[in-house]
Image (cartoon, rainbow, N blue to C red):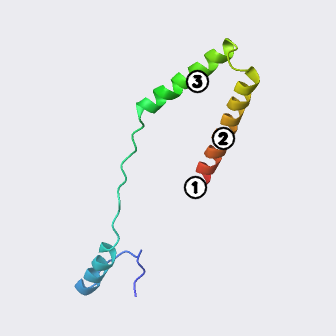
Amino acid sequence: MLHPCSVVINHSNDEVMLLKRFFNGFKIKKKQAKQISKFSIYLLVLFITLVITAYIFDHPPQKIVLIYLGLSFITFLAYTFDKSKA
């Protein structure tokens, strides 16, 4: 029996047809590249701008803003680490 990855050279038509049937079951699925929504990027920039502006004008307590930003950064690092392992 031939190994599935072997090169077919000088084989009978029956063997070639058998290999064609075998490999015909393996379909390559092409994935389309995901398109990033520009709306979510604009929303992110707007949110960060609002948080920084509120921080500068001392509207929310600065401690809460710093805790929020620190936890967001830690979450981002955990997500990046998790995605790199997948």
In which quadrant of the rendered view does residue 6 lie? bottom left
Q: Position of residue 57 (x, y in %)?
A: 67, 11
Give 63 or 20, whichever is nearer the viewer: 63
Which labelled disc corresponds to residue 86?
Answer: 1
* Residue located 64% across and 17% down the image: 54
Is 66 placed left or right of 22 in the picture?
right
Q: Examine the rendered structure and indicate whether residue 57 appears above or below residue 70.
A: above
Disc 2 secondary structure class? helix
Circle 3 residues within 10 Å: few <14, some 14–19, many ≥20: few
The quadrant of the image that shows the N terminus is: bottom left
In three-dimensional space, the C-alpha distance between marks 1 and 2, rounded to whole angstroms, equals: 17 Å
Q: Examine the rendered structure and indicate whether residue 75 appears above or below residue 57.
A: below
In which quadrant of the rendered view does residue 36 lie? top left
Disc 1 residue type?
Answer: Ala
Which labelled disc corresponds to residue 17?
Answer: none
Q: Give the residue pinned by disc 2.
A: 75
Looking at this view, name the residue that lies furthest to the left.
13
Is 50 placed left or right of 60 in the picture?
left
Disc 2 residue type?
Answer: Thr
Q: Are marks 3 and 2 in contact (CB under 8 Å)?
A: no
Q: Give the residue pinned by disc 3.
A: 48
Circle nearer the N terminus (3, 2): 3
Disc 1 secondary structure class? loop
Disc 3 secondary structure class? helix
